[in-house]
Image (tube, rainbow, N blue to C red):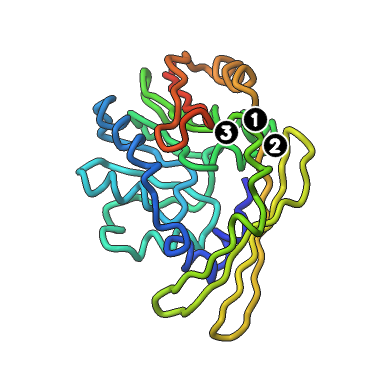
Amino acid sequence: MTADACFAHPHLAAIYDPLDPDRSDLDAYLGIAEEYGARRVLDIGCGTGVFALLLAGRGVEVVGVDPALASIDVARAKPGGERVRWIHGDATDLPPLRADLATMTANVAQEITDPEGWRKTLRGAHGALRPGGHLVFETRDPARRVWEEWTRESSYRVTEVPGVGSVESWVRLLDVSLPLVTFRWTYVFAADGQVLTSESTLRFRERDEVEGDLVASGYVLEDVRDAPDRPGREFVFMARRR
């Protein structure tokens, strides 16, 4: 798994949280961790550590793994960062953790676009879970064609970032070759006029494809839920390690 520039570039990693401050999408995952009574959690694609630190603040033992070192550095420097074990890498090569729960929040599952890389990630998470542990992640429903909403007009905003100044940002769709969709974020820093861009590609998997991959990787699919913050737009997969 290769990190996009918005996570890997130090300047962009540093402003990621201020540009995306509403993380109410994580409330559902906090509820799931409580539902399962998880005391040890593996956060795959932990980024700047928002979810990992929320869990750690509740007394959960957390391991956060991410391929973007700049994001790991941001996470580690946050208050409480010392409570989390941070790993620079991905889920394909993890030590045995015997975790109760492994998660991939937000776009993490879809950012793993290579089919073999996806299967290795599922197997890696399987190896890091204890028997009976759970893997939970979300992926957008391709039928909703959400990429049609990814335009400059709908996404343009100016954000005041403490210590940085005004940052303009917007997204533009580059290519739709299903199941892959590619887009580019542009960031303009008012203080010095610097312009940075970050291209991303997401894989939009059909529900039955994901279900088949989970079963083939040693999981029992227990439930497919709706995403509370985006009803009717995403699948949340709940799988148990056999």
According to the image, label 1 marks what residue? 142
Q: Nearer the viewer, residue 85 or 105?
A: 105
Q: Nearer the viewer, residue 194 or 239?
A: 194
Real-space Cα distance between discs 2 and 1?
Answer: 17 Å
Q: Which residue is at a point 60% across and 69% down the rendered structure image? A: 187
- Dot 3 and dot 2 residues touching (CB under 8 Å): no
Q: How far from the left and from the top, in percent, is residue 7? A: 54, 58
Q: Which mark is residue 114?
A: 2
Q: Which mark is residue 214?
A: none
The residue type indicated by label 2 comes to: Asp
Q: Which quadrant does the N terminus fall into?
A: top right
Q: Nearer the viewer, mark 3 or mark 2?
A: 3
Q: Which quadrant does the C terminus fall into?
A: top left
Q: Which mark is residue 140?
A: 3
> Helix, strand or loop at disc 2?
loop
> Helix, strand or loop at disc 3?
strand
- Residue 75 figure quarter: bottom left
* Most distant residue in the bottom direction: 192
